[in-house]
Image (spheres, grey):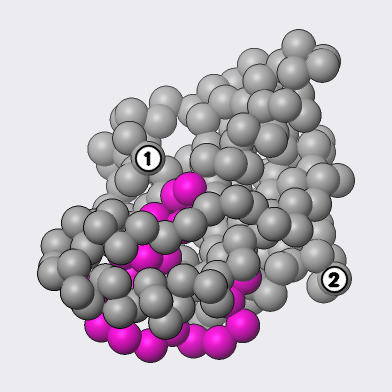
Amino acid sequence: MVSLTQIPVALDPAAVAEEAGGGRAGAEAFVAEWGKRFHPCGVFDEVDPAEVLPASLFAGSPPDWGGPAVVGLCSLGLEEDLSGPEQIRRAASRLLLRDALSFLEYRVRQYLKPVGREPGGILLPGCPEMPLAANRAILDHFGPDMTLGLHLDGSGGLDASRGTAFVYPTGTWRPRLNSLCAQCSRKDCPSRLQS
């Protein structure tokens, strides 16, 4: 298990304003007030996916993983609820989460490199091939001491303004990410926003 207590990302007011589709002044005020309150962190572990994500989670047949997978959590490290204009809050959270996930992917790649493997495309619970119930399974895998302050909501999801769970296949099976994202209705998905 690898724990990253600090993920080096920062909020740029211009990027927040562009992502929010609004004025720079509102983004600058938000970043000035909230920028230092985010403390992105993450944890990941290489696992036998059939043990962490059992077949019973999947509506159809589960993926034939063809080897291990990396499961993890990425948190923005907020200890309080954000305030400010909703569009700016969402934009800032998306940008930070996207950058934190990018850093985590880099660290996963570094972790797998010595054994000659690399991660497949990221899967987030709620993707067409990864059920929302995977959130609970991943949180349970890490236990209460390693959940990074992330909690399930009533629908089994995680608050996207606070963080996300993720899975990287590392065996022979690779998700068809372009077709998955095309089928997906989640407009604020960090995976979709990376492309």
Category of crowding for the residue at label 2, using alpha-carbon neighbours closer than 10 angstroms: few (below 14), some (14–19), many (at least 20): few
Q: State whether the magenta stretch is mostly helix, strand or loop.
A: helix
Measuring 54% from the left and 46% from the top, which residue is drawn there?
101
* Upstream in sequence: badge 2 or badge 1: 2
Category of crowding for the residue at label 1, using alpha-carbon neighbours closer than 10 angstroms: few (below 14), some (14–19), many (at least 20): few
Seen in the picture, residue 31 relative to 130 is either above or below; the reply is below
Q: Quadrant of residue 195?
A: top left
Measuring 67% from the left and 27% from the top, which residue is drawn there?
109
Q: As drawn, is 117 to the left or to the right of 103?
A: right
Membership of 72 in magenta stretch: no
Measuring 60% from the left and 21% from the top, which residue is drawn there?
173
Three-letter code, disc 1:
Gln
Three-letter code, disc 2:
Asp
Seen in the picture, residue 71 relative to 34 is either above or below; the reply is above
Seen in the picture, residue 116 relative to 128 is either above or below; the reply is above
**Highlighted range, magenta:** 77-99
Circle 1: element type:
helix
Separation of marks 2 and 1 at Cα, in angstroms: 29 Å
Q: As drawn, is 109 to the left or to the right of 84?
A: right
